[in-house]
Image: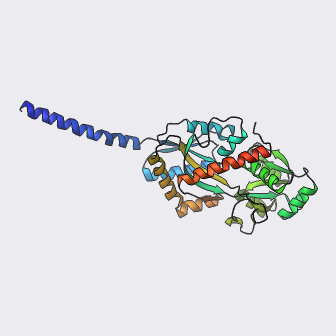
Amino acid sequence: MPARATHSRRTMLGILATAFVPARQSLAQSQQTIRLNVPFTAGTGPDLLARILGEELRQRWNQPVIVENKPGASGNIGTQAAARAAPDGQTLLVTVNTFVMNASLYRSIPYDPEASFVPIVEIATGVLALVVHPSLNVSTFAELLALARSKPGEINYASPGRGTPQHLAMELLKLTAQINLTHIPYAGSAGAVKDLAGGHVSAMILPIHTSLPLAESGNIRILAVGSQARAHQAAQVPTLAELGVTDFDVDLWYAALAPAGTPKDIVDRYNTVFNEILAQPGIRAALDKQGLVAQGGPPDRLAALIAKDRLRWAKVVKDADISAE
């Protein structure tokens, strides 16, 4: 074979080999494991949502997906780990709005709710309800207000702990309604709910799906919900806004975020698939059974929610002089 022909053949083979490198790399990248970082224990709302989304992702993208629970310090430990992950789309944070509240509750936290992350999508919301024990002898929110104002500081309320969404929601209610209730913090929900049902504490703010069975058994009374609209699970229960408490939308909200610096095309791809997943009737029904309402929407909607809530809860924390430390 002439030397010139041999050279041309080698050149062509080299070009072809180079052309296939991106394809091989893309295939290898598509098989990398996606990690959904949940900064809370298994069985919590963020964990449940991460597992639902993770299984759907695995099936749709034919890619391994694992949920990593990294609890501790009110979610700060796992959130920090997610913030420090490579911004390549392989690690996401699935969390609840506590991660915004913590920015005001702690003197310093190892991340910034806005600067450390790129919003992907609001996954779901969970309605919170204002409940009381029957021994308090009130059946309406107006009666609770009257009793609280006649006995300032004598009515106590439970929460799963200082700085939790339930704690801050009740403090916001106290500030807005100008009443004085005494906070009894617990180390988690289980003990608080047990003592509420037993009449050892008088009031609490609880997720609606936790409240309904207790109300049906007569252990508690649901006075109102803190969402913008009535909860379809308890359509007969009024919202606090209907009862005159303005600007009191205190739903729990859950979201997926990526580390800061994650390229827009990756964020958009996740946003698209998550919206497709959340639009499925089966997924919406599964979330409904857990007291959650599927949301979705563009990344900038979540960004606006984070910015708004950061300012809002910072004011509540300051006005009520709350600290998680």
Quadrant housing residue 40: top right
Instruction: Examine the rendered structure and indicate whether residue 317 appears above or below residue 137.
Output: above
Q: What is the quadrant of the N terminus in the image? A: top left
On screen, residue 105 versus residue 259, left or right, reads right
Instruction: Examine the rendered structure and indicate whether residue 51 appears above or below residue 280.
Output: above
Coloring scheme used: rainbow
Q: Nearer the viewer, residue 109 or 13?
A: 109
> Which residue is drawn at the image coordinates 71% and 41% (left, top)?
104
Residue 5 on image: x %, y %: 9, 35
Q: Can residue 132 be seen in this view?
A: yes
Q: What is the quadrant of the C terminus in the image? A: top right
Q: Is residue 160 visible?
A: no
Instruction: Examine the rendered structure and indicate whether residue 307 appears above or below residue 129.
Output: above
Find the residue positioned furthest to the bottom: 236
Residue 31 on image: x %, y %: 41, 43
Find the residue positioned furthest to the left: 2
Q: Which of 264 and 233 is in front in this view?
A: 264
> Which residue is drawn at the image coordinates 74% and 69% (left, top)?
236
On screen, residue 242 versus residue 92, left or right, reads right
- Counting every numbered tag in the picture gives 0
Find the residue positioned furthest to the right: 150
Residue 64 on image: x %, y %: 46, 45
On screen, residue 132 versus residue 86, left or right, reads right
Residue 81 on image: x %, y %: 58, 36
On screen, residue 275 versus residue 310, left or right, reads left
> Which residue is drawn at the image coordinates 78% and 42% (left, top)?
322
